[in-house]
Image (cartoon, rainbow, N blue to C red):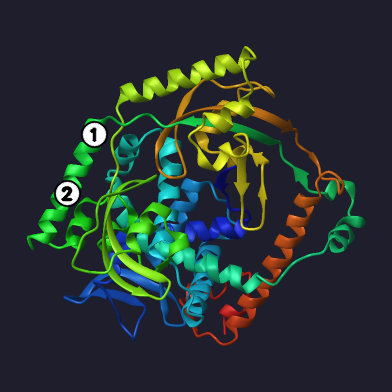
Amino acid sequence: MMKVRTMTGLAAAIMTVVVMATNARQSARTMMAVDDDSTRVNRPESSNNIVDEVVWVVGDEAILKSDIEMMRLQAEQEGLKWNGDPDCTIPEQIAVQKLFLHQAAIDSIEVTESEITQSIEEQLNYWIQMIGSREKLEEYRKQSITQMRQEMHDDFKNRELVQKMRQKLVSDINVSPAEVRSYFKDMPQDSLPMIPTMVEVQIITSEPRVSQEEINRVKNQLREYTDRVNNGETTFATLARLYSEDGSARQGGELGYTPRAALDPDFASVAFNLTDPKKVSKIVETEFGYHIIQLIDRRGDRINVRHILLKPRISSEAITQAKERLDSVANDIREGKYSFDNAATYISDDKDTRRNHGLMANVTEQTRTSRFRMQDLPTEVARQVERLQVDEISPSFEMINSKGKRVCAIVKLKSRTESHRATITEDFQVMKDEVLAKRREQALHDWVAEKLKNTYVRMNEQYRDCKFEYEGWVK
């Protein structure tokens, strides 16, 4: 099934907003110093030039006024509504994430560059789907995709650390069927959760063919990079920072110590056979594009390498041909020449779906299902599904897949279940997920409350009269 990762719950939404502050702000912090006698932040070269203000300190982590304003702006863009006064809720939520990050450091929680890169690419692909194209996104944000990747890196690293820490803290919490039934047994009918309209969607994708001339251009460019490194003209890391189209470019292409299973099989096969850190690998083709790789170090079953990724450009003619091919397939299915299931199995280029007759999968932290809320579908897919009746097939359209590739697709609406009150017989999994989520959120709430008892906190006087979710901030 085509995997679409979604996050659920207010806490997850808040966490996403928290870590979306720009890396430009992080860079600015490195030019500042905290004065121990006040809550002002000054540039080292001018003690009287105040550029920001420290409003909270949690442990040894400062929260700047700009952090709060950045989160407020991001929340407005995401349409997030705050419970209570935002002037109090926002800094408290930032402080909670600081606690998780601090504990992640204590517990030696690690994230690999490949995990960070995947998260960044998923976010970029989501934005591209929303706005329509890479070019429109770059114009809207007034940044290149490479600049966005670099800017997002540190914040997405923190997001992954927070997510892993939260998962570790609640990993042992589960609920039994009896507990689910007991939870809802005496609940009034009008208090039962509403199940939104859910759909199941099948998809067939076709990757537009890249011309041989374009493939040769990319390979020649990578060969030139290899020659420049071998001739001592420059370093591999410098070229990666300048030219790689992967999120690891900011780190000079370095991925960090990564197990074989976390890497593309073709990439891993070459990377794990490298033995000389001075040598550059042959060109490697993966589903992401074309790479060259340089070994840094190997520790047991983990390897640390640098790589440069280049992605071939797709012509408008190739896109038109792919769409026409899919429209022809859709017409053949409508005429009964073969089924959508068979077409997805034998024709689709999507590896995640074709083994399951094109059925897309909705993957969350706790569950994997074929049922989607409309807002959880990829944007371009949702636009098509809105117009379809059950068993209807869409015309062809373009989208960005989970690997960041531009593909063409057709979809079929397999089923639609209208919004209704949950019942234990038909919606047991949904009800179980709700009980489990409540248990885990309560466990995290209790952990934060306990953590605060032994954590140093200082805040500006203006916040001391706030009505916080946790009582331990004011001591």
Q: Give the percent coordinates (x, y) of residue 107.
A: 51, 80
Secondary structure of the residue carrying tag 1 is helix
Mark number displayed over residue 214: 1
In the image, is residue 8 above or below residue 300? Answer: above
Q: Give the percent coordinates (x, y) of residue 356.
A: 63, 39
In the image, is residue 60 above or below residue 278? Answer: below
Residue that appears at 72% across and 31% down: 416
Q: Amino acid at mark 2?
A: Arg
Which image quarter holds the C terminus? bottom right
Q: Earlier in the sequence, mark 1 or mark 2?
A: 1
Secondary structure of the residue carrying tag 2 is helix
| In this rendering, position of residue 219 left or right of residue 405 | left
Residue that appears at 85% across and 63% down: 179
Q: Nearer the viewer, residue 399 or 99?
A: 399
User: Quick check: marks 1 and 2 in contact, CB under 8 Å?
Assistant: no
Q: Classify 10 Å Cα crowding around label 1: few (below 14), some (14-19), many (20 and above).
A: some
Q: Give the percent coordinates (x, y) of residue 344.
A: 57, 30
Q: Residue 359, located in which quarter of the rendered image?
A: top right
Query: Does residue 264 appear anywhere in the picture?
Result: no
Which image quarter holds the N terminus? top right
Mark number displayed over residue 308: none
Residue that appears at 89% across and 47% down: 189
Residue that appears at 87% across and 46% down: 425
In the image, is residue 331 above or below residue 430? Answer: above
Q: Give the percent coordinates (x, y) of residue 412.
A: 62, 26
Give the alpha-carbon distance from disc 1 to disc 2, as whole Å.
Answer: 14 Å
Q: Classify 10 Å Cα crowding around label 2: few (below 14), some (14-19), many (20 and above).
A: some
Q: Which residue is mark 2?
A: 223
| In this rendering, position of residue 27 left or right of residue 124 | left
In the image, is residue 76 above or below residue 407? Answer: below
Q: Amino acid at mark 1?
A: Glu
Q: Residue 187, located in which quarter of the rendered image?
A: bottom right
